[in-house]
Image: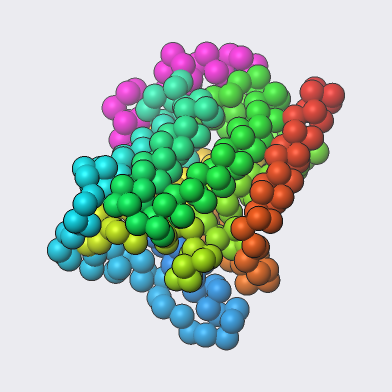
């Protein structure tokens, strides 16, 4: 089947022999898996860092325990905050959940697979980032404004690099539809060794580090006012609202790790919505995401946080690699 035929099948819903109901169930399974697996990935990276630094560290399930604790606390808002502060966590979680539901994480053709274009998924993530930045600006505090401006600066540099990297993959697959790219890669496994994919992979890893606020772009465990980015935006959130923000960020991390795993290494993803295939898909996705978490955690241990004015240089390098990947793909197609 040609890449164009694969895309047409995804749009019309005939890419798999299963009906709409099983595909909806598969998308719900994806959201549940990422909602649980995202915090576990955060705990796994913290555990790896602790072990590498000679500490025991908290258990891998600690982020889930923290979420349970936050849900039970009282909701407190800043005195002069508006409804924006309350809605920001909801928009963050909702946008992440929709992006997860339509992305090829556990199955190649989830519900609304025809609409899972790279631009749609990236801008769903951007919607959550903008909502969180507006929530940081809403109370009018200095730290919130500082963190929001820094986050938007990084996002403005990271999003183009991510889109151009996916564009490099779409040249071979002849589509920017993410399920179409994954399905076409499964049909042509030799693509995975092409130089444009290696360049795009490095660019995407740098973008994922920036988007998830990991070292060297940001330090998720810092509380120093002059260095924190993400923490500065969420200082005014408390209780269930802070829990939603934490869950939303963990889901975004799980989604990005899953996309890296399946766009570049799609082995093990379910091709239909039968129960054995979905169970295998969840297990393989978890293993691949854990491997990516291991690599990023080791990068964090071995590097220091960059100064803020050096971050654009790093993201510009990722953008250049993405452009080189596109040019290589156009030359070698």
The residue lying at 74 percent from left, 46 percent from top is 317
Q: Which residues are magenta?
A: 2-30
Most foreground residue, 333 or 283: 333
Per the picture, the main secondary structure of the magenta-coloured stretch is helix
User: What percent of the width, then of the height, locates residue 325?
Assistant: 76, 34
Q: Is residue 169 visible?
A: no
Q: Is residue 21 magenta?
A: yes
The residue lying at 51 percent from left, 66 percent from top is 226
Q: Is residue 235 left or right of residue 320?
A: left
User: What percent of the width, then of the height, locates residue 224?
Assistant: 48, 71
Most foreground residue, 175 or 123: 123
**75 lies above or below 330:** below
Q: Quadrant of the C terminus?
A: top right
The residue lying at 70 percent from left, 24 percent from top is 171
Q: Is residue 237 left or right of residue 156?
A: left
User: What percent of the width, then of the height, locates residue 27?
Assistant: 36, 36
**105 lies above or below 249:** above
The part of the image, by quadrant, that contains residue 31 is top left
Q: Is residue 43 left or right of residue 259?
A: left
User: What percent of the width, then of the height, locates residue 162?
Assistant: 61, 38
């Amino acid at each position: 089947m040609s890449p164009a035929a694969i895309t047409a099948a995804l749009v019309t819903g005939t890419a798999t022999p299963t009906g709409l109901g099983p595909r909806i169930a598969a998308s719900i399974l994806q959201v549940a898996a990422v909602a649980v697996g995202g915090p576990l990935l955060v705990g796994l990276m913290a555990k790896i860092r602790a072990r590498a630094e000679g500490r025991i560290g908290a258990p891998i399930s600690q982020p889930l325990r923290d979420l349970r604790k936050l849900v039970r606390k009282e909701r407190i808002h800043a005195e002069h905050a508006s409804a924006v502060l309350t809605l920001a966590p909801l928009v963050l979680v909702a946008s992440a959940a929709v992006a997860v539901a339509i992305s090829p994480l556990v199955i190649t053709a989830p519900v609304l697979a025809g609409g899972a274009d790279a631009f749609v998924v990236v801008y769903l993530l951007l919607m959550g980032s903008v909502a969180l930045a507006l929530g940081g600006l809403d109370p009018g505090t200095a730290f919130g404004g500082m963190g929001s401006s820094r986050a938007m600066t990084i996002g403005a540099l990271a999003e183009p690099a991510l889109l151009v990297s996916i564009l490099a993959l779409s040249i071979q697959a002849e589509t920017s539809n993410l399920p179409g790219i994954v399905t076409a890669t499964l049909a042509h496994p030799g693509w995975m060794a092409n130089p444009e994919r290696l360049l795009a992979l490095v660019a995407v890893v740098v973008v994922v580090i920036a988007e998830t606020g990991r070292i060297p772009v940001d330090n998720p465990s810092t509380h120093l006012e002059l260095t924190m980015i993400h923490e500065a935006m969420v200082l005014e959130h408390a209780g269930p609202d802070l829990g939603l923000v934490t869950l939303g960020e963990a889901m975004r991390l799980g989604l990005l790790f899953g996309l890296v795993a399946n766009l570049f290494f799609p082995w093990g993803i379910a091709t239909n919505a039968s129960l054995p295939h979905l169970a295998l898909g969840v297990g393989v996705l978890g293993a691949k995401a854990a491997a990516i978490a291991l690599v990023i955690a080791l990068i964090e241990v071995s590097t220091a946080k960059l100064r803020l004015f050096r971050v654009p240089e790093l993201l510009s390098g990722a953008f250049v690699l993405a452009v080189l990947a596109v040019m290589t793909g156009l030359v070698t197609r």
